[in-house]
Image: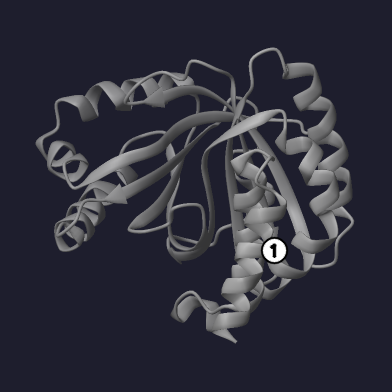
Amino acid sequence: MLLKFILCINYLVMIFKNYHSLLLTAIIAGIMLSGTPISGFAQKAKPVYEIAVRMVKKGKKIDFVDQRSKFIKLLKKQEGVSNNREFQSFYALPQPDKREVFIGLTRYNSLETVGNVSRKVMPRFMQFAQTMDLKAYVFVMLIAGKKFKLNKLAAKKGQVLEVAIRRVKKGQNKAFQETRKAFVNYLSKQKGVLGSWEFAVVGGKDRERLTVGMSVYKNKEVFMKIVKQVQSNPLAGKYFSTFDPVALQYAVSTTND
């Protein structure tokens, strides 16, 4: 089984070597998720969320919007897929983005669903992939936080969604977990913070030591106020020192039609 899996991956690399690496990543991720248990989470029939942080290629905005719309329409028709959401990033850490960034979030019934759907939508995705570059691409499962409903996530006008995709530094996992919990506890007590959730990464691009957190703020004013408070908070400094940011995005809900 392992040899067959490796040969399949090598075959895909050979066929698609002239396509953008984003496409290859998605194909491989789909195969891995459909046939290979990634962790203990993969054994459970629980929802899986896809997070795609996409940077629009220069001069491709019109094509990006058009291909995204066509791809999402097809994706929504697939069995086991629901609550596809789109967010437009307006702020990023530690450095501002040089291109427009959009975040796609999709709910799948299970890891098996991801694999089944990937094969059906791949031709359409191939066209969409030519309009963007990936900043981050992961599949996650909820592990902490109150009930998570993607259809209601930062859905009200003005609400801000924080998506934090971080890579824990080697040897820092214990410190990361301890400081993260303390920081989230601090954050949850701030006025205007509407919720926080933590996810385990179970698949996707370069997932080694990746973790994902999300928070929702009442509006941009609240968000900016908290950002200023955090900058001088010793606890935040200790927490941020335990990981390297992959994609720390702050975004508002938008359409993908």
- Horizontally, residue 17 falls left or right of residue 70, namely left
Closest to the observer, 106 or 35: 35
For the view shown, which residue lies furthest in the front direction? 14
Q: Quadrant of residue 210?
A: bottom left
Query: How many marks overall?
Result: 1
Q: Is residue 46 visible?
A: no
Residue located 45% across and 21% down the image: 91
Q: Residues within 10 Å of mark 1 (few under 14, many from 20)?
A: many
Q: Position of residue 97 (x, y in %)?
A: 46, 20
Q: Secondary structure at mark 1?
A: strand
Closest to the observer, 225 or 97: 97
* Location of residue 241 with respect to 29 vertically, above or below: above
For the view shown, which residue lies furthest in the left direction? 234
Closest to the observer, 246 or 178: 246
Closest to the observer, 142 or 5: 5
Residue located 79% across and 62% down the image: 119
Q: Position of residue 48 (x, y in %)?
A: 61, 65
Residue located 70% across and 12% down the image: 59
Residue located 18% across and 47% down the image: 242
> Label 1 is placed on what type of residue?
Tyr
- Horizontally, residue 29 falls left or right of residue 192, namely right
Q: Position of residue 198 (x, y in %)?
A: 41, 57
* Location of residue 116 with respect to 1 vertically, above or below: above
Q: Position of residue 169 (x, y in %)?
A: 21, 51
- Horizontally, residue 232 falls left or right of residue 74, namely left
Circle 1 residue: 108
Q: Is residue 164 visible?
A: yes
For the view shown, which residue lies furthest in the bottom direction? 1
Image quarter in which the N terminus is found: bottom right
